Amino acid sequence: MPNALVASAKVLETIDERLLRCGISRRAFLIFCSSLMIAAPYGLAITEKKTPEEVAAGLGKVVRPPVIWLHFQDCTGCTESLLQTSHPDFGDLILNIISLEYHETLMAGSGLQARQALDEAVKKYAGKYILVVEGSIPTKDQGIYMKMAGRPALNVLADIGGKAAAIVAIGSCASWGGIPSADPDPTGAVGVADLLPNKSIVNIPGCPPNPYTLLGVLLQYASNGTLPEADELRRPKFAFDRDIHEHCTRRAHFDAGNFVKQYGDEGHREGWCLYEMGCKGPETHAGCSTRHFNEIPDVWPIGIGAPCIGCTEKSVAFRIPMFQVVQLHTIAAPPTSFAPITTTHGSMSPLATGLVGLGVGALAGAGYVASRKFSKEQGYDGPPGSTPSNSEPGDDA
């Protein structure tokens, strides 16, 4: 258990204490843990090689982490994605698994009440809470493009982010600017790590990202006080260690050279590869192809017939035009068609023909001599291939 959360144990409940106080049965919690093991990100340390009972025993002792959720330049799509989870559903998540202290979209209060709730949460859990940031932060003309409770967005992030134990930047906008940072970028939009480079930050890019990646990060931190192993872009490796193309359900069509040429054509209807439509799957690291949204098969961009735009890659999404084909760096280009069944045969020279004929003649002569010898040993001297008079057709020689 992280030291910061141990210090706050007097004011925060463990998950077990919360469930007991709310009258939620142990059986219901075991069902939740079973679902978690299926739906939570692969490689999540708290579920790896454990039974549901072992997971429940470990999670039950975890102090529910206090979470403050801030919105900056965003469309609220990341929150909307989180609202659609079912293992656990959002009610379980915010009421029993984490302690959501502030979230502008979900809280009942507004205006002065909302500001007071935020100030109280920051003061109460300073150095203990996890800050989740949704949306990019404008850096140009401070205060013109965005203010929160009368303060420029930059100041709000510096204040609240500076007091957080860890920060999760959810979505491409919070990770590195996203849509607001696309040219001409009038607001100077940047991600959280650009402004707080020395903080413990996990980037979960996506437009929107898979909500279970956030769940995995929060539970791992609450469980043992650590953040997942990350790549050079601060993305958790358990969710971003594979590229979409390698695990794409349409990969066989890529290898066969079957490509969609335009939306609605025969190939599109048949589920062919979308590479020539600008699919960025070969350059995009994410788990979309193996972990679909809302637990519904094929609910992800390529699954519904749209090319991947590379939303989890800083140098791809909102930088490369949507229908521009990306280069294949580590993957061999697909063939234009299947290999032909028949091949063109060369001609034999007269000398080779003569030698082959000589060889065939020698084999035939040897066969004739052998057959004559065999017939004489059996007491028959008739022409080869005829039946001896003392045997019936079909008898063994």
Image (spheres, rainbow, N blue to C red):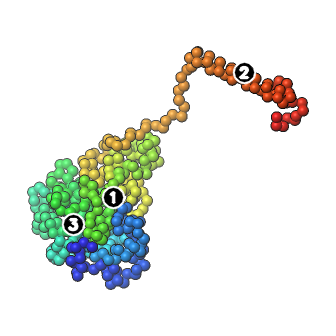
Real-space CA distance between mark 1 and mark 3, rounded to the nearest whole angstrom:
19 Å
- Is 342 placed left or right of 192 in the picture? right
Which residue is nearer to you in this view: 304 or 120? Answer: 120
Q: Which mark is residue 298?
A: none
Task: Look at the numbered disc 2 and give the secondary structure of its residue.
Answer: helix
Q: Residues within 10 Å of mark 1 (few under 14, many from 20)?
A: many
Q: Amino acid at mark 1?
A: Ala
Residue at 54 percent of width and 25 percent of height: 345
Position of residue 382 relative to residue 127, above or below, is above
Real-space CA distance between mark 2 and mark 3, rounded to the nearest whole angstrom:
90 Å
Q: Quadrant of residue 158?
A: bottom left
- Is 5 placed left or right of 42 in the picture? left
Q: Earlier in the sequence, mark 1 or mark 3?
A: 3
The residue labelled by disc 1 is 239
The residue labelled by disc 2 is 365
Which residue is nearer to you in this view: 95 or 366? Answer: 366
Whether residue 56 appears in this view of the structure is yes
Q: Give the position of the C terminus as an image quadrant.
A: top right
The residue labelled by disc 3 is 166
